[in-house]
Amino acid sequence: MKYCTNCGAEVTSDAKFCMKCGVSILSNTGGEPYKSVLEKNPQTPKQSGVFGSYTEQSLINEEIIIYRAKLHWIIYLGSVVTFLISIFCLRLSDSEDDFLGNLGASLIVWSIIQLIITLIVVRTSEFFVTNMRVICKIGFIRRKSVELFLTKVESISVDQSIIGRILGYGSVVITGTGNTHDPFKMIDDPLTFKRFVQDQVAKHAQ
């Protein structure tokens, strides 16, 4: 899949001209066939495999990454609380009543499972602002993603609770032309992410 670098419209892989604006799909340097930024510069790190960067592998012609956000450390809170409760149960257990001991052992196993799941979510989640698009992807087995060209972004809002404002995390909601997407939660420093999106949208509007 590739896109017109002039208007952002999707074009077929063998297209030579954009059907929407008529601009040539070939690059401006000697008629070189369409290539992404990573293909033009092989020295640029390009991860592959299950946990490879989706965004870095899908950059389109002349697209560069401006800003990258990440999930806040608060996402680990559930597994940490479960682990602390398990330790508390184990300390209270005795030989006469082993219920707390079994409960504590079960909670330790569950906290480890929670931690592994959280690590996978963090590793496979991406929040990028490029000079052409806003790309948000979260999840591995169950994936939720939003890819919007900057010209299609109508608004971006941030929702933060009191604790979120204190600790520096919140939910980001991106609204595209005619669509409102579900919020991406627990984003670290969401206001900075919002500012970079607005800056790039303003540049495209000039």
Image (cartoon, rainbow, N blue to C red):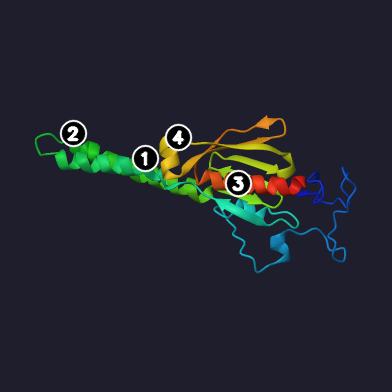
Kind of residue sitting beneath label 2: Phe
Q: Mark on residue 161?
A: 4
Distance from disc 1 to disc 3, alpha carbons, whole Å, reads 30 Å
Disc 4 is placed on an element classified as loop
* Residue highlighted by disc 1: 78
Distance from disc 4 to disc 2, alpha carbons, whole Å, reads 38 Å
Relative to 93, does residue 12 appear above or below in the rendering?
A: below
Discs 4/1, front? 4
Disc 2 is placed on an element classified as helix
Kind of residue sitting beneath label 3: Arg
* Residue highlighted by disc 2: 99
* Residue highlighted by disc 3: 195
Q: Judge the density around disc 1: few (<14), some (14-19), many (≥20) Cα neighbours within 10 Å.
A: few
Task: Please report whichever mark, 1 or 2, sits nearer to the chain's N-terminal start.
Answer: 1
Relative to 132, does residue 35 appear above or below in the rendering?
A: below
Residue 195: x, y in percent?
60, 46
Distance from disc 4 to disc 1, alpha carbons, whole Å, reads 18 Å
Distance from disc 2 to disc 3, alpha carbons, whole Å, reads 52 Å
Front residue of 172/192: it is: 192
Discs 4/2, front? 4
Kind of residue sitting beneath label 1: Gly
Residue under the image location 71 percent in, 55 percent down: 63
Q: Describe residue 37's horizontal placement relative to residue 187 as left or right.
A: right
Q: Describe residue 199's horizontal placement relative to residue 143 as left or right.
A: right
Task: Please report whichever mark, 4 or 1, sits nearer to the chain's N-terminal start.
Answer: 1
